[in-house]
Amino acid sequence: MRNALAEIAKYAFAFAVAALAGAVLVAVMRGDVLGAYRTFVWSSLGTAGGFAQTLNKMCPLLLGGLAVGLALRGGYFNIGVDGQIYAGAIAATGVALALETVANPALAPFAVVVGVLGGAAFAAIPAVLRAWWSVNEIFVTVMLNFVAVFLTEYLTTGPWNDVMAGEAITRLIPDAAKLPMLSVRAGSHVGIFLALASAVLVWLVLERTRWGFEVRALGDNERAARVAGIRTAWVTAAVLVASGALAGLAGAIEVTALHHRLILGLTPGYGIMAILIAVLGKARPLGILAASFAMAILLVGSDSLQRSVGLPASAALVFQALIVLSVLFVDAKRSVRA
Amino acid sequence: MSASAVVTLLLDPELWRLMLTMAAPLVLAGLGELVMERSGVLNVGVEGMMAVAAAVAFLTMLKTGTLLGAAAAAMAATLGLAVVLGYFAITLRSAQLTVGLCLFVFGTGLASLLYRLVIGVTTATPTVQTLPRLAVPGLAEVPFLGTVVFTQNALVYLALALVPVLAFLLVETSLGLRLRAAGENPRALDTVGVNVRALRYGAVAVGGLLIGLAGAYLPLAVTGAYSDGIVGGRGWIALMVVIFGRWQPGWALVGAILFAYTEALQFKLALVTKAVPPQVLLMLPYVVAIVVLVRLYQGAEPPRALGLPYERESRL
């Protein structure tokens, strides 16, 4: 009981730090602080449209958080979720545009699957390098983020460019490749169900399968896992590929359910927010679920303050990082005292 | 393209000069990270710290017009971030990788936020004058080397000079010996009465200052403007440079030059070829980095206590 209260107090403290930072920022910009808080909560939770926005943002954040968290359970840091989101989005867009003339409703799920494979394939590079060449996955995934962004820039301004738009965006994908809306009026799409299902799946795999046990064993103690007969190289490769697949799914959903095209700037740093979410959620699916919901609220709320008081979009990232640093601070303080 | 044309292109003195210009931030950040890691503290937040430094340096330069003030403000900002990292890593004994990653994200957001708060949304990107080139009298006329080495901006000279200075301090002085001991065997150091914490805090502070200078270099010496992607992975590459250099300043310089060469080559190729899309050329430094990475870890031995918090009271 006392532990639970201490945990609640910890998160309350962390969110208070972020709220205080927000108040200072709004005050610096000569905005009305209380009004800003009201706008923040109302825009993200208070209306059907706002809540739909929150769910739409939660989708890539949850999937990205699961991607980072899954790799983390195996003892690896996937910093390349942004790149893998782009890879998934590119693959989904590619297949949707290539099959433009096929007016078959199966095209949408097919594009999503191809997107998942795209993310997985992109993550296979750091996976293989880590598993069999002991190359640090952090560096490889970070470098591949840049490669993915430039590839997206090339495709959105070059071969797939929408010449009418005059922006770095591709042509629209055909209607058959679009995932359905959850609520047309509110503007939410079905992606959130895919993300929630993924969270359940990741939990089941980690806690209820032999492979999941091997992943956790690897993350706890690599040497012990190897001595126990686990083929650590294969588990390493698989967990990083699976991590990329989750990110790829996020990218595919952004294309088939939200933007209906590939755009440069498709992920405004979901991948680095995902790192925070995985840390905040302690790499557990349920924790990641809660953390991604909170971060989505922050993102949508901050976004509305951008319109009302001109709060820069990057403020959300600062708030998110402050929350996680505050939690790490309290955790560390406690363990030092203990 | 004929073979001789390729050789002429690869050995073009202008290309090599650009290489050194682009190597300087990698050298500065790499040396900063090296000092921290040699003392046993791992800082993976370099990229975010450099971003904050770039924003602060640019904004200070824009508002005050003083180069020294801009560099000092940037270094003060990263010093602050480094002390936060030090507090978590040294005093609170947190997982350094996790804290470093969070600082990377925090810095990335903070840099962009500061810029937007001061500049707002504008159509015209504000710019500042970049550092002038200083030709070293007498040496600048030497064929090839004169162009490559002796017509650089002041910070390139500073970065190059810091390499032997730091190598000397690390290897030849008792302070350097103690610093290295803090990263190899902190308990032994503690046993002879040296304050491990103070040493590590000192190393983190020095590292933060150097990383700040590296970040400030980008708007002040290269672009003359700030954009959110300005660091462009150089913070991560600085971390690789340290490993490439086996935690030794001289070899870190070689690593920085190697990475900077591919970056300069990409600029050069974009000028001479129209056949390849520019984005493919822009990928080149990152792809090369991955190729280098494959060999990077073979035989690399980090300081033995790197990333491990030192607990005085713990049992052996």
Image (tube, rainbow, N blue to C red):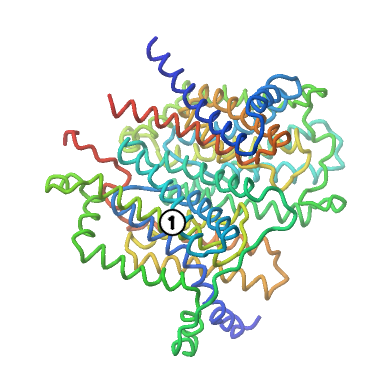
Q: Is residue B55 or residue B166 the one in the foreground? A: B55
Locate residue A32 relative to residue B255 in the image: left or right: right
Residue A217 located left or right of residue B175: right
Which residue in the protein does label 1 denote?
B211
Q: Chain of mark 1?
A: B
**Residue B128 percent coordinates (x, y):** 62, 64
**Which residue sits at x=43%, y=19%?**
A7
- Indicate the secondary structure of the residue bearing disc 1: helix
Q: Quadrant of residue A10?
A: top left
The answer to whether residue A164 is seen in the rendering is: yes
Classify the position of the C terminus of chain A by image quarter. top left
Q: Residue B227 versus residue A282: which sits nearer the camera? A: B227
Q: Residues within 10 Å of mark 1 (few under 14, many from 20)?
A: many
Three-letter code, disc 1: Ile
Question: Total marks drawn?
Answer: 1
Q: Position of residue A21 (x, y in %)?
A: 54, 33
